[in-house]
Image (cartoon, helix red, strand yellow):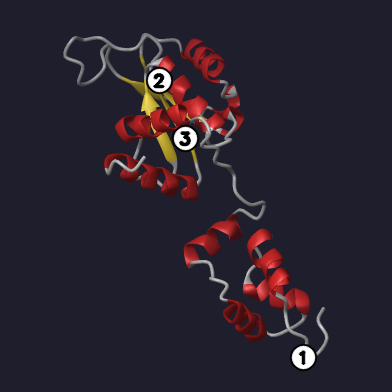
Amino acid sequence: MLKRGEPISHELLQQLYFEQGQSAQQIADRLDVSYHKVSYWMDRYGLQRRRQSEAGYLKHNPDGEKFKIDLSNRDLFIAGVALYLGEGDKTNPSLILTNSDPRTLKLWVRFLEIVCSVSSKKLKAHIDYYEDMEYSTLLNFWSGELGVPSENFEHPTLKKGRTAWGDQRGQRSLYGTVHIRFHDSRLKSLMMSWINDLLDGKL
């Protein structure tokens, strides 16, 4: 609590607003001052406010970011961005990558773990498979290959017929197709900016 007429220091606003992610109103309530006083001192120090989308993100993620970016492994970073450019869902607010090749999906999981600090234990997945496949066998296989807990696999999709649609050779994966999902709108936004930078030759 501040004394009457006491200014709000730059250091305190930096700590509460940026480091702890509190809103201007929460700071006002905490310091027992008006919202306008917090707003005045933020403007006085030239502290830029969060956009509404960022404020909403922090409200729904009170523990802070779900990820932390590490760009020290540049080869893996570029590989992950290029992979999402080719195989990732660009419209969903979540990061969703679909493939049937275990090596490709393991590369994607490695990108999430090493570059984005997202554990495979936090990922969701589901399997598309065909009538002549045994789902329990597929689940055990993919869970073991990707390190995604079996309980994180959502309801599968059973497809009719024995061959994959659109494959002129009549071939398909022996293990079905897997969709890997990690929901974080901010990380998805970062991925789309990385893709644009890759296409523009800036990476």
Q: Mark 2 or 3 closer to N-term?
A: 2
- Residue under pointer 2: 104
Instruction: Name the spot of residue 141 as percent of width and height, x first.
Output: 51, 12
Q: Residue furthest left?
A: 168
Describe residue 98's horizontal placement relative to residue 67 as left or right: left
Residue located at (48% from left, 45% from top): 187
Mark 2 and mark 1 residues within 8 Å of each other at the beta carbon: no
- Residue under pointer 3: 181
Given residues 116 and 202, the one toward you in this image is 202
Label of residue 5 in the image: 1
Q: Could you tell me which secondary element the residue under label 3 belongs to? A: strand
| Image quarter in which the C terminus is found | top left
Given residues 6 and 179, the one toward you in this image is 6
- Compared with 21, 184 (above or below) is above
Q: How many marks?
A: 3
Q: Crowding at label 3, few (<14), some or many (≥20) Cα neighbours within 10 Å?
A: some
Q: Residue furthest bottom?
A: 5
Instruction: Name the spot of residue 90 as percent of width and height, x first.
Output: 33, 42
Instruction: Name the spot of residue 31 as percent of width and height, x first.
Output: 77, 77
**Given the image, on which type of amino acid does mark 1 rest?**
Gly
